[in-house]
Amino acid sequence: MSEVIVVLAVTGIIASLMLFVLPRITENAEKTSDIASLKLLDQATAIYKTTNNIWGSDAFKGIYTDSARLKALYDSGNIDRITVPRTEEGVFSWGLYDQKWGVVHVVSGREVEMAQSGGFTGRIMGSYSGDEKIIKIPASINGTTVKEVHQDVFKDKGLTSLVLEEGIERLHARSFMDNDLTEIVLPNSLTRLDYGAFLNNPLIKVTIGPNVQIIEGGVFQKNDLFVVAYNAGGAGTYVFTNGNWVKQ
């Protein structure tokens, strides 16, 4: 009888350990799979750029969404299927700066409030409750087109990378204040940046479209110099160097 008890006790311990270890094993397998997929996407993109005689910094020049980029690779025969990451709530996203594919977390309606009626329709509200630091704000949440990000929603969340899909028109005051963003690509649909939208981020590179009409104070470091540079240079990529913003 005592031997049976020992066996049962050991079995229970092993089961408990598996419950603790199994999620980590699964997570590591998902990451390994995604890394392999990213390598294939990068290789396919290099071939796509060469065969289509695309010159310049962006392999997908003129294509502005990740879904359209993946479709272009598929339609050109450079990938045999459009894959999705195994990482939960992740998507493959094209990096305009490093010209490589990566996995980013898509912000969902479980992590933010999405106004769906009245004068605030299309505005992300509340406070981001997710833990992910590399995020993408999609063009639609809960079936509603995202037009604006309200005050303080992503303030002080430790964000290190941010993708904003086309369709977003306004970032309200302090919406991404106090994070760790160093580079940002603003969608061409953006028309307004309110006070402190990116205040206290170590931003050194900003890509901005042609339609921004209002840039309030404190959006970027040396904000007045950025506004002067943008008014003179228009759409493009601006780099903060030697205390000034310079268009590349």
Image (cartoon, rainbow, N blue to C red):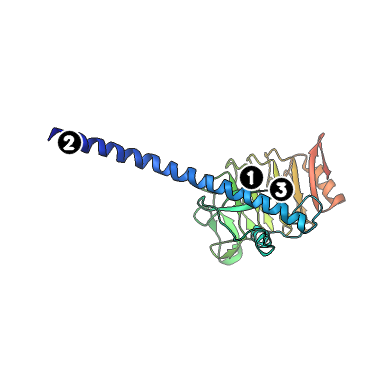
Q: Position of residue 10 (x, y in %)?
A: 25, 35
Q: Secondary structure under badge 3?
A: loop
Of the residues under marks 3 and 1, which one precedes in the sequence?
Answer: 3
The span from disc 2 to disc 1 (Cα, nearest Å) is 53 Å
Q: Are marks 3 and 2 in contact (CB under 8 Å)?
A: no
Q: Secondary structure under badge 1?
A: strand
Q: Position of residue 217 (x, y in %)?
A: 74, 45
Whether residue 208 is visible, yes or no, is: yes
Query: Residue at the spot x=53%, y=44% of the render?
Result: 32
Q: Secondary structure under badge 2?
A: helix
Relative vertical location of residue 122 with respect to residue 87 in this rendering, above or below:
below
Q: Position of residue 69 (x, y in %)?
A: 68, 59
Q: Position of residue 216 (x, y in %)?
A: 74, 49
The span from disc 3 to disc 2 (Cα, nearest Å) is 59 Å
| Circle on res. 161 | 1
Of the residues under marks 3 and 2, which one precedes in the sequence?
Answer: 2
Task: Give 98 or 247, whichever is nearer the viewer.
Answer: 98
- Horizontally, residue 92 falls left or right of residue 6, namely right
Task: Name the amino acid, label 1.
Answer: Ser
Task: Give 48 or 69, whichever is nearer the viewer.
Answer: 48
Task: Name the amino acid, label 2.
Answer: Ile
Q: Are marks 2 and 1 in contact (CB under 8 Å)?
A: no
| Circle on res. 99 | 3
Q: Quadrant of residue 79?
A: bottom right
Report which residue position mark 2 lands on. Answer: 5
Q: Nearer the viewer, mark 2 or mark 1?
A: 2
Of the residues under marks 2 and 1, which one precedes in the sequence?
Answer: 2
